[in-house]
Image (cartoon, rainbow, N blue to C red):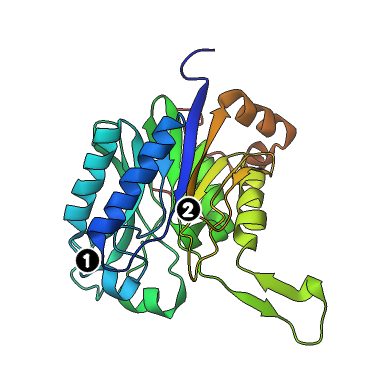
Amino acid sequence: MDNTSSRRVAVAQGVAVIDDVDQNLATVTRLVLEAKDAGAEIVVTPELFATGYAPDRAWRHDGAAIRSSLADIARSAGVALVASSVDSAACPESARAHYIAASVFGTGGEEIARVYKRHLFGDTEREWMTPAGAYGEVFAWRDWVWGAGICYDVEFPEFSRALARAGADVLLIPTAVPRADEQAEGLGKAWHYSARQISTLQVPARALENGVVIAYANHCGPGFTGRSCIATPFGHNAVILGDEEGVAVVEVPRSGIAAARRVNTYLTDVDRAFGALPNRTGLPPRLSVQ
C-alpha cells in the first residue's frame, strides 16, 4: 500500500471551561497527543474549544494568539490539527460582530486553510457573530482533497454537496451541539427529536449522499451531546464516542471512498442534471464554493 492510499483521521472530544484558555489548550494538547499515539495524522477538535463555547464571550479573547498556540500544538505533536477560534480581523468594518473560524494547521504549524461558519445557530450566535457569505474552499494536504465547515453547516445538505462537488473527499467539522429533546405532545416515539440524532442520523446521511468521509468533533460534559463520530460514505459511523472525554481514530482508505461512489453515483448524477463543476481530477479546484 503506498503512502497516499489511506489517511488516519481522528476526532477528539473533551470538556472545555468557558474563558479558561490555558486549561482548554492544555486539554487540546493532551487529546492531540493521545490521538497521535493511536496513529492519527490529522485531529479534529470541537468548535470554540479554546475559549469554551460561549459565542457572547469567545470574541473577547485574542483569536490570533489562540491560533498561534494551536499552531504550536500541531508543530510539537507532529500532526495536523483542525481547531476553532474567533476571527474578528477578517470581518467587514460594517459588521457588528465576528466570524467563527476553523483553522487547519499542518504538522509544521503552518495554517493550511481557514474557513468561516456560514450557518449561525441560535440567537446568541446571530447576535454576536457574522455569517460567512460562502462556504470555504477545498484544500490539498498530503495528496488528498479536504473540506471544512463548522457545526450547524453540516446540517444543511447544500454544504456537504457543494464541497463534494468541488472535489473534497473528507470533510472536517468542529462542532458544539447542545442537548435538546423535543416531543410532539400526544404522539409516539416517532415524533420525538433529540440533538443526538445529528451524530447518528444526519452526519452519516451527509456522508452517504455525497460520497465523502465526515469527521465530526463535539464537546462533551454538561449541556452537550458528545458523540463525536467519523462517518463513511456508505452511511455508517466507523466510530462514535459516548458522553465522556476521548479520541477515536479511523484509517480512511481512498479505495473505500471510490467504492462508495461506484455504488451510489450521486455526484455523477447531479453533474448530469446541473452540469459538472470544473476540475474533477482529484486536484483542488481552489474555487470559492457558493
Q: Residue at x 34, y 49 (%)?
A: 28
Residue 57 vertical placement versus 276 (above, below): below
Q: Residue at x 29, y 31 (%)?
A: 107
Task: Label 2, secondary structure: give it.
Answer: loop
Task: Check the picture and name the quadrant holding the N terminus.
Answer: top right
Q: Nearer the viewer, residue 44 or 104?
A: 44
Q: Nearer the viewer, residue 181 or 253?
A: 181
Q: Which residue is mark 1?
A: 92
- Mark number displayed over residue 245: 2
Under mark 2, the amino acid is Glu
Under mark 1, the amino acid is Pro
Task: Label 1, secondary structure: give it.
Answer: loop
Q: Quadrant of residue 250?
A: top right
Q: Residue at x 51, y 69 (%)?
A: 178
Taking the image as shown, residue 267 lies to the left or right of residue 101, namely right
The CA span between labels 1 and 2 is 37 Å
Badge 2, how many Cα within 10 Å: few under 14, some, many 20+? some
Task: Check the picture and name the quadrant holding the C terminus.
Answer: bottom left
- Residue 90 in the image, given as x and y percentages of width and height: 22, 59
Badge 1, how many Cα within 10 Å: few under 14, some, many 20+? few
- Residue 235 in the image, given as x and y percentages of width and height: 69, 44
- Mark number displayed over residue 195: none
Q: Quadrant of residue 261?
A: top right
Taking the image as shown, residue 7 lies to the left or right of residue 87, namely right
Residue 224 vertical placement versus 111 (above, below): below
